[in-house]
Image (cartoon, rainbow, N blue to C red):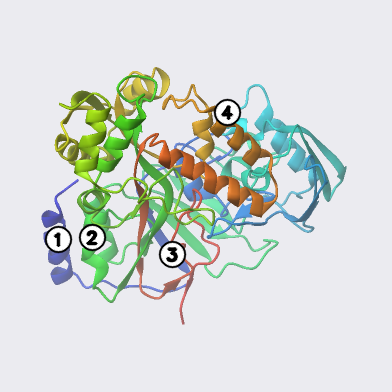
Amino acid sequence: MRSIATLLVSATLLLTGVTAVFAQADDITIAVALEPPALDPTAGAAEAIDIVTYQNIFEGLTRIDRDGSVQPGLASDWTISDDGLSYVFSLREDVVFHDGSTFDADDVAFTFERILADDSTNAQKSLYEVIEAVEVEDPQTVRFTLAQPSGRFLFDIGRGDAVIVASESAENNATLPIGTGPYAFVQWDRGSRVILERFDSYWGDRPPLARATIQFIGDTATLINALLAGEVDGTNNMAAEALEVFANNPEFQVLVGTTEGEVVLATNNRIEPFSDLKVRQAMAHAIDRDALIEGVTYGYSAPIGSHFAPHHPFYVDLTQTYPYDLERARTLLAEAGYEDGFSATLKLPPVGYARQSGQILASQFAEIGITLELINVEWAQWLEDVLTNHDYDLSIVAHVEPFDIGIYADPDYYFGYDNADFRELIETLNTTTDDAERRTLAEEAQRILAEDAVNGYLFELAQTGVWRAGLEGMWQDSPIEGLVLRDLRWSE
């Protein structure tokens, strides 16, 4: 990535040398950084798939709204049995797939049988293994029977991994996606763009824009120039260091929100000295989040004190559990037997936020006598060394799955956190369906992780959108993977 100075020079040259024409009609071109490897969100793990397809081409029985809440989707309503084991969904009528075939309960049954099949390539298959049976009661009614109550069931079936596909077209969805959403797939120019058009037979409200082009631009300077020239109308995630190009430009609006990406100093709790709570507490006291956020994301991120997204309604602000306090950090290290500090390795994957955070944290930890050796690794090596083999001391990575606090209930996970009380709490949370009770349990789970300083909780990755002035309906926060087009419109 070019330096910010180079980007600003480039932008200035473009502004003085080009007269951009900003067309505001009934179409839009949006730039995103990554091209998806395929276009079937039920058969691949890449977030880039959902960016293009989720709630645009494909829909689920439920859908996740901009505030993270669960709303009706292809199911208009549902009833839940008293024991929480049976969900009966009433399906919307007059819904058709983009190829004209009719949507009904058989498509729902097919979709989940495919997800749970032995040869399934669904990235989140484990979320749906709670399903014991899917029964078609009539064309508009389908019953799910669960092995145990699941407080996340309605959310999980609203994710991109559980969108409804048809048996007639599912095999080709990777390259020719056919769903029930408000936009139909038109073409995919590999290496360049995907074009979608409004589906006139859509069952729901008619989306305002007739045509949407998702253009793939990975280079920040190229993206800046494309925006200023009027070649694209916006992006959901501009590099933070480039936002000042647009912040005071009346032709644009900058929307800064949060994502589901908790950036953590991942800590190997199973090995010394990190198995000692006082060592982890000392590290927590040595972290200056404000300096990290300013240095890594130019101030465009939210600090976190536990493993939870700030935009979630269950979020608790725990950033002051271990406030920045170098004297307290040194005292705790001495109490743990490390008065002179210690040395450790910090393995960093190939993303800017991780490697920049690593450099700043190394400087901060040096203040209390902890010497970090920074080891840059590629993703394949990170997955093997850190995630699979647990061959690491410390690492920095963003965990981007929604509501994934339950990963700490697995002592075999790469953190090596083994807390029987926490496991019991998560098991109760997972089987609780009452929303108020779930909130109480989720808040307690956050507090346990914060107090145990399982990881260094740094910041939530920001969603930094830049959009043409006059465009409305964009999501400021990103509670789930996706770039939802349904509400986008040009103001009059």
Kindly identify the residue that appears in the image at 51 percent across and 54 percent down. Answer: 312
- Is residue 407 left or right of 383 when viewed as pictured? right
Q: Earlier along the polypeptide chain: callout 2 or callout 4?
A: 4
Mark 4 to mark 3 CA distance (whole Å): 33 Å
Residue 460 at x, y = what percent? 37, 49
431 up-or-down from 376: above or below: below
**Which residue is disc 4 drawn over?**
121
Q: Given the current orientation, which residue lies at the most extreme bottom position?
A: 492
- Of tags 1 and 3, the one toward the viewer is 1
Is disc 3 placed on a helix, strand or loop?
Answer: strand
Is disc 4 placed on a helix, strand or loop?
Answer: loop
Q: Amino acid at mark 4?
A: Thr
Q: Earlier along the polypeptide chain: callout 1 or callout 3?
A: 1
**Which residue is disc 3 drawn over?**
28
How packed is label 3: few (under 14 Cα within 10 Å), some, or many (20 or more)? many
Mark 3 to mark 2 CA distance (whole Å): 17 Å
Q: Amino acid at mark 1?
A: Leu
Kindly identify the residue that appears in the image at 37 percent across and 35 percent down. Answer: 455
**Which residue is disc 2 drawn over?**
225
